[in-house]
């Protein structure tokens, strides 16, 4: 219920509002606008493993490429799991690589689906931003069935729509006196002077479904299965192009749109039971696949038009495909060793195969500089790649003496492309009494690069810049001193206390430190031309990669993923809940959850000699890791119930966050989002057992983050740089759109 009461129709934002150590991406640049990410304890989204009913969930094919704290994310897209299908969510934040997989460095999010066998529930909600745009409609229904005796089937269907928003400033190019004299028709463009709409939400329509089934085949054998399926169609505005680009077709200029058609599917089939002798077993197979087809609408290929006299206006830019097939066989047994509790011994085997594919765009989209705003994927970008992984794990848990629990886990994995890894975890907990306990964990982890991090390659353009994202293992990458990626290695230490001083009060306090060596991060902007410092090797790498860049841009360069740094994350997390009964006045469920997390770069690997004096990570890239997410988050909640009326009030405090930004790598300016308290409020009335109505607001008082650094904006405006449209920082932890207001009708039967 706490997820539903957030008013958010997507799971990522709903989880973030309930878990302060989980930072959700509120706004994404470029293709990341289509697939928002989340991350635990300041680490990459790729360091959190997502499970559904305890089984591994596949990642998205849509890699977050451009800068920011979520750069490189290609984790599971939680928004393809309907909130209405979820019974509850378990979050394990002690490094869990030994038990669940070597990539569970930050922790595990385990989504448990409903197992209802009768009845149903659902809701219809709608809302919008107070200052315009973001119109949202969502409808969801969950139905329970009993197809035959000793069986259940829970089906959830959901459909939603989210509209464009625009929170950008005025593009300085369109109000420049010289440009207005040269192109007086600029004033005739729709919406003038706000013609550049890139700083806002994408528009999307999404339809998703989930089913969870189970059947007892005998007293000792159970068949189970679950699946999700979804389709999304989205579009996002790109930077406005001036009238001189193609006046015969677009006399007042044009605003290209990136288009996105995605299909996501996952299914698990398993059987579990118990053998004679009390051995429990579980055999399962899970397959997931995500396919994203990219396009460009309302655009043109200028070179194609110049040379042939014609150009398509809509293009197929290519596709991403990511799949994962996982097979598991698990056994467990309880042994009586005369301890305080039986010793639980578990052992398991896993085989996994991952694939990643980039498909080339149509000929027009990739001819020379390609379609305006998003060149199609070239033949050198395209390719299909795969990896297999085999693993075995052992877990031993028991209480040698009353109150003292020890859990020891070990895991061995072998990757077809990176060799072997051995990880382990030791957890100990001592319960002094039913009201007080202490706990501690030590573990290590190992994360192989995702196939997307290894092989993604594309060209990112704006009216002023053209940057090539080089695949780390490409010939072009070797020219700048990067020769593929290595796995990350991590060490995780945590300790905490658990207090239950009263039946209605629970308190936990945990401290942790996570050290990652050879962490995979995106580079800063590496200039080949137009920067304050340029490297000839960068231009050579672009040519070696086969890219032809728009000749009208003033800056060219590359971005690349590399094992550039070692980082250390230190933090403290506090959670307290109190349930109070005030008699005729009603009941109140109080909650306080706080997280302090400091991420520090403790080592920067030597810059390749080919790039000097440039470095792989500039000030922007470092700040994206260390300061672009707030170190402090506090959620305070009060849920009041009195008869048919429910009021849910939540105050979310975000500490300051900042990013260093530059136009050309010469001078860096600090953009800071000051601390903010964001108020969420929802009021619900239960008219009957079947019907309820809720109204609410996220960001009730319509707060916005601080503007981008004024000196940087002034420099961009003086240079007639389209980047000046971005007046609110995209890394803002509470978004750039202001208050969202909604109403929801719920029903049960």
Image (spheres, rainbow, N blue to C red):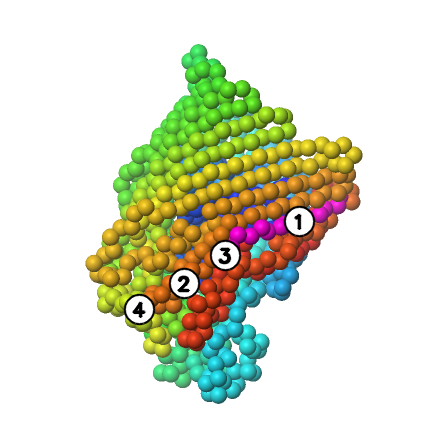
Q: CA distance from mark 1 to mark 3?
A: 23 Å
Mark sitting earlier along the chain (3/4): 4
Q: Nearer the viewer, residue 718 or 611?
A: 718
Residue labelled with disc 3 = 673
> Could you classify mark 3 by the number of other residues whose Cα lies within 10 Å: few (under 14), some (14-19), or many (20 or more)?
many
Mark nearest the camera among 1 and 3 is: 3
Mark sitting earlier along the chain (4/1): 4
Residue labelled with disc 2 = 669
The overriding secondary structure of the stretch rendered in magenta is strand
Residue at 66% from the left image edge and 49% from the top image edge: 681
Q: CA distance from mark 3 to mark 4?
A: 27 Å
Residue at 61% from the left image edge and 54% from the top image edge: 699
Can you tell which mark lies on residue 532? Answer: 4
Q: Is residue 105 left or right of residue 216?
A: left
Mark sitting earlier along the chain (2/4): 4
Element on which disc 1 rests: strand
Mark sitting earlier along the chain (1/2): 2
Which stretch is magenta? Answer: 674-686
Residue labelled with disc 1 = 681
Q: Where 692 sits versus 365, above or below?
A: above
Q: CA distance from mark 2 to mark 4?
A: 15 Å
Viewer can see residue 233: no
Mark nearest the camera among 2 and 4 is: 2
């Amino acid at each position: 219920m706490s997820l539903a009461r957030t008013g958010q129709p997507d799971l990522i934002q709903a989880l973030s509002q309930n878990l302060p150590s989980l930072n959700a991406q509120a706004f994404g640049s470029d293709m990341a606008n289509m697939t928002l990410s989340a991350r635990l304890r300041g680490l990459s989204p790729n360091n959190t493993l997502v499970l559904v009913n305890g089984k591994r969930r596949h990642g998205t094919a849509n890699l977050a490429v451009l800068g920011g704290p979520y750069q490189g994310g290609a984790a599971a897209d939680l928004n393809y799991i309907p909130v209405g299908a979820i019974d509850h969510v378990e979050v394990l934040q002690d490094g869990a690589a030994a038990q669940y997989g070597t990539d569970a460095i930050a922790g595990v999010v385990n989504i448990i689906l409903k197992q209802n066998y009768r009845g149903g529930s659902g809701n219809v909600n709608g809302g919008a931003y107070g200052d315009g745009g973001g119109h949202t409609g969502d409808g969801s229904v969950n139905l329970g069935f009993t197809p035959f005796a000793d069986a259940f089937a829970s089906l959830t269907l959901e459909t939603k729509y989210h509209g464009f928003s625009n929170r950008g400033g005025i593009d300085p190019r369109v109000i420049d006196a010289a440009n207005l004299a040269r192109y007086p028709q600029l004033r005739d463009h729709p919406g003038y002077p706000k013609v550049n709409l890139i700083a806002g939400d994408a528009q999307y329509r999404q339809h998703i479904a989930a089913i969870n089934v189970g059947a007892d085949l005998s007293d000792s054998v159970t068949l189970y299965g679950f699946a999700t399926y979804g389709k999304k169609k989205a579009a996002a505005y790109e930077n406005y192009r001036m009238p001189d680009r193609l006046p015969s077709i677009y006399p007042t200029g044009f605003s290209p749109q990136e288009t996105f058609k995605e299909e996501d599917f996952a299914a698990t089939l398993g059987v579990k039971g118990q053998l004679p002798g009390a051995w429990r077993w579980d055999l399962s197979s899970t397959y997931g696949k995500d396919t994203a087809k990219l396009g460009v609408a309302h655009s043109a290929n200028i070179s194609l038009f110049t040379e042939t006299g014609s150009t398509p206006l809509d293009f197929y830019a290519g596709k991403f495909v990511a799949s994962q097939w996982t097979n598991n066989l698990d056994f467990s047994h309880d042994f009586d060793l005369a301890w305080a509790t039986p010793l639980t011994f578990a052992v398991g085997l896993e085989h996994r195969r991952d694939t990643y594919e980039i498909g080339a765009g149509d000929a027009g989209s990739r001819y020379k500089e390609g379609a305006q705003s998003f060149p199609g994927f070239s033949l050198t970008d395209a390719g299909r790649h795969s990896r297999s992984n085999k693993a075995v794990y052992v877990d031993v848990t028991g209480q040698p003496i009353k109150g003292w629990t020890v859990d020891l886990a070990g895991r061995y994995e072998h990757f077809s492309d990176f060799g072997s890894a051995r990880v382990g975890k030791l957890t100990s907990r001592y319960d002094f009494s039913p009201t007080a306990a202490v706990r501690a964990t030590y573990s290590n982890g190992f994360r192989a690069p995702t196939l997307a991090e290894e092989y993604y390659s594309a060209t990112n353009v704006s009216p002023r810049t053209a940057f090539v994202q080089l695949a780390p293992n490409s010939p072009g990458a070797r020219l700048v001193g990067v020769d593929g990626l290595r796995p990350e290695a991590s060490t995780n230490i945590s300790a905490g206390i658990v207090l239950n001083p009263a039946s209605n009060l629970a308190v936990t306090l945990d401290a942790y430190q996570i050290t990652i060596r050879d962490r995979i991060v995106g580079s800063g902007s590496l200039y080949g031309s137009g920067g304050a410092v340029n490297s000839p090797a960068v231009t050579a790498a672009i040519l070696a990669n086969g890219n032809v860049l728009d000749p009208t841009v003033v800056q060219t360069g590359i971005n690349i993923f590399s094992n550039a740094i070692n980082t250390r994350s230190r933090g403290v997390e506090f959670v307290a809940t109190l349930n109070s009964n005030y008699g005729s006045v009603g009941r109140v469920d109080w909650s306080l959850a706080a997280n302090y997390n400091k991420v520090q770069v403790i080592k920067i690997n030597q810059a390749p000699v080919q790039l000097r004096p440039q470095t792989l990570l500039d000030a922007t890239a470092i700040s994206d890791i260390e300061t672009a997410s707030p170190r402090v988050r506090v959620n305070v909640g009060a849920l009041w119930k009195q008869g048919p009326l429910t009021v849910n009030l939540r105050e979310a405090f975000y500490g300051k966050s900042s990013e260093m930004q530059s136009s050309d790598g010469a001078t860096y300016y600090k953009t800071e989002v000051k601390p903010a308290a964001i108020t969420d409020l929802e009021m619900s009335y239960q008219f009957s057992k079947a019907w309820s109505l809720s109204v609410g607001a996220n960001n009730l008082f319509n707060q916005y983050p601080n503007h981008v650094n004024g000196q940087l904006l002034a420099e961009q405006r003086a240079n007639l740089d389209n980047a000046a449209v971005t007046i609110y920082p995209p890394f803002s932890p509470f978004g750039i759109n202001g208050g969202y207001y909604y109403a929801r009708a719920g029903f049960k039967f």
